[in-house]
Amino acid sequence: MTRVAALDCGTNSLRLLISDVDGGALTDVVRTMEIVRLGEGVDRTGRFATAALDRTFGVLEQYAKAIETHGAERVRMVATSATRDASNRDDFLTGVRERLGVDPEVVSGDEEAALSFAGATTELRGTGRFPSPYAVCDIGGGSTEFVVGDDSGAKAARSVDIGCVRMTERHLRDDPPTAAQIAAATEDIDAAIALAATTVPLGDARTLVGLAGSVTTVAALVLGLPAYDAERIHHSRLSAGQVGETAASLLAMTRAQRAALGPMHPGRVDVIGAGALVLDRVMRAGGFAEVVVSEHDILDGIALSLVGAGW
């Protein structure tokens, strides 16, 4: 058994998993998330904002203390969409190295998708409850990853720039967004899904697995949870109708109304409408009747990779 620390730094959130890995099995020691919005404004300016870097570095200092306290033997940090896009990414890379003692890996969209696939599907193999092939959809802040594979691993992957932060900043600016803004976002999302489908055969999949905070928050709302409950959300099933109704409802609400919803994390209030819309359009495009929601994702894939497990 090996104790590892996996960090996932995306456009919106910074997450840490400290886990004991035994073969392909993970036992959580610490699993935590903070909204740092590292990618704030990157779609418009092409640069990390100073305030966003400061927020991220502050959380990294807390995570470094946790890693030391719990004695993780191996550490890997993956930085995703916003870091690929920012012209001043060297400022970020240096700051991480100073605080964490390791270099963050700015992975490609395809590698990000493969790690997400491993993390999301390891538990599904051989259960009989979730038939393969699987289509994994990881809706991030800056990008969405699509990957299709089976019990032997990922077969095709594509990353496209339709994350919830990017779509909100680009299109959904009013409170609530106008019909014209929602239509423009929908057109953008549909075009990106069509592009992904040229290399990722979504139609071959028998099980759609949805990942990340937008998907799990939609699940919490569909389930009527008074507060966020990861145990009840994990491997819940949402119908296409439930997702579509929830997306429409969220897009019709003001920020204040969304903030008042019990399971809503404060850092997702302004972007959850876009995230729900992406999930709805993916299900429509792929003809999926339901989505299986997973709390295990790229973070688990990073942890498995540290011991050569997963795929």
Image (cartoon, helix red, strand yellow):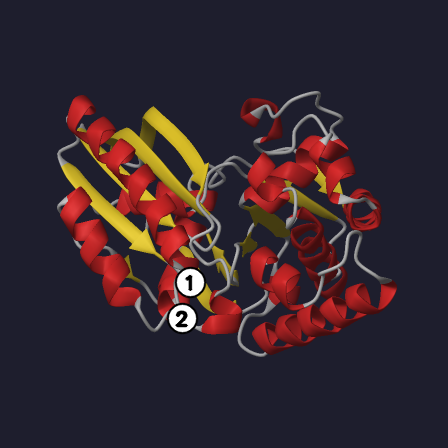
- Foreground: 205 or 231? 231
Give the image location of residue 22, x and y in percent.
24, 30
Q: Quadrant of residue 83?
A: bottom left
In the displayed structure, would residue 266 be above or below residue 289?
Answer: above
| Callouts 2 and 1 close, C-beta under 8 Å | yes
- Is 114 situated left or right of 3 in this image? right
Mark number, residue 82: 1
The local crowd at label 2, few if under 14, some if 14 to 19, many if 20 or more residues have their Cα within 10 Å, is some
Looking at the image, which residue is at 44% across and 65% down?
A: 155
The local crowd at label 1, few if under 14, some if 14 to 19, many if 20 or more residues have their Cα within 10 Å, is many
- Is 176 situated left or right of 54 in this image? right
- Is 24 situated left or right of 289 in this image? left
Q: Secondary structure at mark 2?
A: helix
- Is 253 situated left or right of 264 in this image? right
- Foreground: 175 or 246? 175
Residue on which disc 2 sits: 85
Q: How many marks?
A: 2
Looking at the image, which residue is at 76% across and 58% down?
A: 174
Give the image location of residue 38, x and y in percent.
42, 54
Q: Secondary structure at mark 1?
A: helix
Q: Quadrant of the N terminus?
A: top left
Distance from the alpha carbon under mark 2 to that under mark 1: 5 Å
Q: Label 2 is placed on what type of residue?
A: Asp
- Foreground: 184 or 108? 184
Q: Label 1 is placed on what type of residue?
A: Ala
In the displayed structure, would residue 98 be above or below residue 146?
Answer: above
Give the image location of residue 195, x and y in percent.
60, 78
Mark number, residue 189: none
Res. 160 visible in picture: no
Give the image location of residue 120, x and y in percent.
47, 44
Res. 265 visible in picture: yes
